[in-house]
Amino acid sequence: MSKSKFVIDKLAKLFEQGLVSYKDLSAEILNILKSKRDEIIFKMKITSKEETDVQNQRIENLEKKIEKIEKNLKTKFKKGKKL
């Protein structure tokens, strides 16, 4: 009940301020919904898309480094011992 009251209160404030045009009203509604979405995501401790992209890039860099090290180790062991 309190969540719906929050949205209704926000809409009432918009009408009080005189934001009657459709574009202004739709923009304000989108801003309200985005802020509520961000608040929920913050409470759930979910990472944002930017943070996820950064983490994926770090993982790719680490995988490349591991592959490079594995290649170097294979070449060292092949050259190292001759019987």
Image (tube, rainbow, N blue to C red):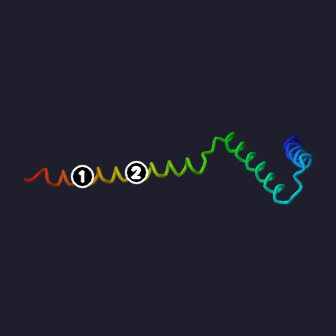
In the image, taking residue 51 as reference, residue 38 lies left or right, namely: right
Query: Measuring 67% from the left and 41% from the top, which residue is drawn there?
Result: 42
Occupied quadrant, residue 21: bottom right
Residue for point 17% across, 55% down:
78
In the depicted view, which residue is nearer to us: 64 or 14?
Answer: 14
Q: Where is mark 2, residue-wise?
A: 61
Going by the image, does 21 lie left or right of 62?
Answer: right
The residue at 24%/50% (across/down) is 73
* Badge 2 vs badge 1, beta-carbon distance below 8 Å: no
Mark in front: 2 vs 1: 2
Instruction: Kindly identify the amino acid type of the residue bearing the numbered disc 2.
Output: Asn
Disc 2 to disc 1, how far (Cα)?
Answer: 17 Å
Residue 44: percent from left, percent from top: 67, 42
Residue at which label 1 appears = 72
Element type at marker 2? helix
Q: Secondary structure at mark 1?
A: helix
> In which quarter of the view is residue 40 placed?
top right
Front residue of 1 and 7: 7
Q: Residues within 10 Å of mark 2 (few under 14, many from 20)?
A: few
Q: Front-most of 11 and 7?
A: 11
| Label whose residue precedes the other's in the sequence (2 or 1) | 2
Q: Where is residue 30 shown, x and y percent of the image? A: 77, 53
Judge whether 20 appears above or below 3 on screen: below
Task: Name the residue type under label 1.
Answer: Asn
Q: Residue furthest bottom?
A: 22
Residue at 57% from the left image edge and 50% from the top image edge:
50
Q: Nearer the viewer, residue 73 or 8?
A: 8
